[in-house]
Image: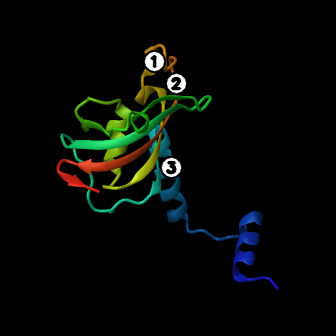
Amino acid sequence: EKGVWDEVRGDMKDGSVDVPEEVTESFVLKTDAQKAAEGVEVTTTKEGDGKTFPKSGDTLAMHYKGTLAADGSKFDSSYDRGSPFKFKIGVGQVIKGWDEGVVKMSLGEKATLNISPEFGYGARGFPPVIPPNSELVFEVELLQINDKKA
């Protein structure tokens, strides 16, 4: 016996689902803006508190693991050092992909940041560990904003 979801999935496959145009447009615009204009895509893997977000100039403590998108090789990890990375957000202390991606995270959130070369280390790379024009993937965890811990 077919259920409601079986019918919906079937309709989606044959294109007969009637989706209002404004829903389609807003989804497409958001996706384009996230992937093209921003240079960093943030994918939440564990929800944070949903209300405490970092702003420019805040001091943050984060754990992270950085890998190359091309082959998955790890180039850095605060986990390996056993100590969170502390920095000020939004003031150029970190790569642009972090400055723009991390402010979208709430306290306690874990996320994956997919960063374009332009929002990472660009044409120069970071020899010898990051080749020129590398897309980067960071698994990050926002542990603290100023004095407030997750």
Quadrant into which the C terminus falls = bottom left
* Residue corresponding to mark 3: 31
Taking depth in this image into account, of 101 and 144 the one nearest to the observer is 144
Quadrant into which the N terminus falls = bottom right
For discs 3 and 1, the disc positioned in front in the rendered view? 1
Residue 142 location, x and y as percent? 34, 49
Q: What's the residue at 79%, 82% (across, down)?
A: 2
**Vertical position of residue 7 compared to residue 51: above or below:** below
Residues under numbered marks 3 and 1 in contact, where contact means CB atoms less than 8 Å apart? no
Q: Distance between the residues labelled 1 and 2?
A: 7 Å
**Vertical position of residue 49 compared to residue 18: above or below:** above
Q: How far apart are marks 3 and 1 (CA)?
A: 27 Å
Q: How crowded is mark 3: few (under 14 residues within 10 Å), some or many (20 or more)?
A: few
Q: How far apart are marks 2 and 3 (CA)?
A: 22 Å
- Using residue 103 as the reference point, say whether residue 148 is left or right of it: left
Q: What's the residue at 74%, 77% (across, down)?
A: 7
- Earlier residue among tags 1 and 2: 1
* Residue corresponding to mark 2: 134
Residues under numbered marks 1 and 2 in contact, where contact means CB atoms less than 8 Å apart? yes
- Three-letter residue code for mark 3: Thr
- Three-letter residue code for mark 1: Gly
Residue 3 location, x and y as percent? 74, 83
* Residue corresponding to mark 1: 125
Taking depth in this image into account, of 62 and 15 the one nearest to the observer is 62
- Earlier residue among tags 3 and 1: 3
